[in-house]
Each structure stands twice: as structure tokens, then as C-alpha cells.
Amino acid sequence: MPNTTLELAPDLTLTRMGYGAMQLAGPGVWGPPRDREAAIAVLRTAVELGITHFDTSDYYGPYTVNEVIREALHPYREGLRLVTKVGARRDPDRSWPPALSRQELTDAVHDNLKHLGVDVLDVVNLRVGAIDHPTAGSIAEPFGVLAELREQGLIRHLGVSMVTSEQLTEAQSIAPVVSVQNLYNLALRQDDTLVDRCAREGIAFVPFFPLGGFSPLQHGVLDAVAARLGASAQQVALAWLLQRSPTVLLIPGTSSVAHLRENVAAADLDLPADAIAELDGIGA
């Protein structure tokens, strides 16, 4: 597939096929990995395969995933970029309540710096909505806190997660935005308009749960197209996203080296027009 990387700024070029680290945590994204050596192997294989876009958060675990990333990859290879999220925390009941106060955001940035072992974070996404939908309202106050931390040199670039188009516009009035990370995949396409807007403005659109997340994508049309192309359904779903927009970046997660290789191979799968037309009908 052409255009395997996307330059979002002079110092920020990301592979369009990235790696999402959430699945490296234990069950329920809680606690350490089931198999720490396997997790380390996945991360190191991702680097060997040329991935430069690693998506994580200090609230995965919490803390444990970032610590495993540091153990596996530090000192980080030149060009490797760590993208993290703030705006939530983990409670003992394993819930994900918002954490958007000035102190919580400041502490989260410093915690990410410490656990990843870096002096500056490449990209920090502000998560402001629920896991499955944005929450309406102003995001000026929390985004402004991150903009201040960027001015202090702790963050290079800012993004937003689970936002509306209006909230993106508001954030852009405060500081440059390089990425939007919202729920989007072949079946859940409520953000079609926002995907197109990001393409026009040169902003990365990073769909989380690109394969359905906790409820994996399943559809007869997807299976039929995959069988015809000699690929897995997951590879076809990822390839569809890459061809959906030139600024889509993917961060599928896995704790398996074999699955990681399968995901990366999807970047070379060129879907013909008739297949794309069939797949487009799934989310219609």
C-alpha cells in the first residue's frame, strides 16, 4: 500500500500502521501482562517490523503497560514516537472515571514522562468523552492545561480523543491539533464527516477499536470479501480503514507476535474497488 507513513509536523512522522499497547495489560486492561516476556517480544518485533507509532496510556494497567514499554524499548530507537492519552484514571473497581482537573492532567503528564523514561512526550491526546461516544460541551479548560504543558516543553504535540467536530475546532483555537482519536471502524461509522474533515486539514484520524475492540467485527460480507482475496477478515477491515482516508492511522493491539505480523501485513493489502463498495455497505 502506498503512503505507508504520514508526516504531521517536521518532527512527527508516523507509520500509518501503528501499534496499540492496551492489550499488553492484564484482563480488563488491569494489572501486569499475563506473560511479560511475550509482551516484550511483541513490542520489540513491532520495532523490527518498522513501526514508529506506539499508542499507550499510563492508565493502562494502570502504569504497568508504560513500564513494560520502557523495559522493552528504552533507549528508544531514533524516529520511534510514543503517543499517550490523559483525561481518565483507573479506580479500584476497574472503572475509567474522568480525570480532567488541572492537577490530574498535570500529574498524568508527569507520570507518563516518568514511566516511559522520557523528558518530553511526542504526542498527548486529551480524552474528553466516554469510551463509546463524545460528551458535548467545552473542552477549553482541560485542553488549555495541556497547551500550557506544551509551552513548558513537556509535550511536543497535542491531540484529542472522543470529541465532536465542534470540540476539535475549539481545541484548534487554543493550540495546534495533530490527531483525533475516536471510535471508528468498518461497522461503526458515525464519524464519517469528521474523518473527511481531518483529511482536508492534514490531521491524523486514529480510530480506536479498529477491529471492534471488546466485540470483534463479524459480518458475512467481510468474511466473503476476505475469502475472495485470500486474506483474513481482520486484515481486510484494517486495509479498508487505510484506504478510507489518507490521514487515517491505525493502532490495532495484540499480545501475540503472530497476530502482530498479520496486522502489519494488512498495510500491503490493496482492496479493489468492487470489494470497497461491498464493504462500504456494512456501515451504511
Image (cartoon, rainbow, N blue to C red):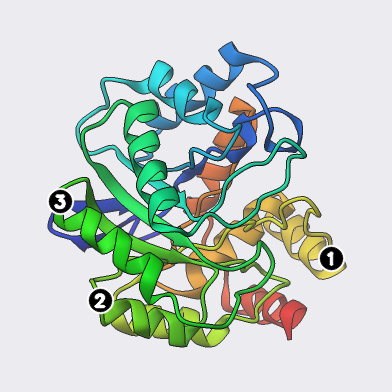
Q: In terms of depth relative to the viewer, which is nearer, 84 or 102?
A: 102
Q: Residues within 10 Å of mark 1 (few under 14, many from 20)?
A: few
Residue 232 horizontal/vertical position (percent): 71, 49
Residue type at mark 2 is Ile
Describe residue 266's horizontal placement relative to residue 138 as left or right.
right
Residue type at mark 3 is Gln
Give the residue furthest to the right. Answer: 220
**Quadrant the C terminus occupies:** bottom right
Decide: marks 1, 3 in contact (CB < 8 A)?
no
- How much space separates mark 2 and mark 3, taking CA atoms? 15 Å
- How much space separates mark 1 and mark 2, taking CA atoms? 42 Å
Residue 173 horizontal/vertical position (percent): 26, 82
Q: Earlier in the sequence, mark 1 or mark 3?
A: 3
Rendered image: mark on residue 152: 3
Given this view, does label 1 or label 2 mark the residue nearer the observer? 2
Label 1 SS? loop
Identified at 66% across, 25% down, the residue is 31
Residue type at mark 1 is His
Q: Is residue 15 above or below residue 206?
A: above
Which residue position holds label 1? 219
Q: Is residue 281 above or below residue 250?
A: below
Identified at 81% across, 64% down, the residue is 224
- How much space separates mark 1 and mark 3, taking CA atoms? 48 Å
Which residue position holds label 2? 174
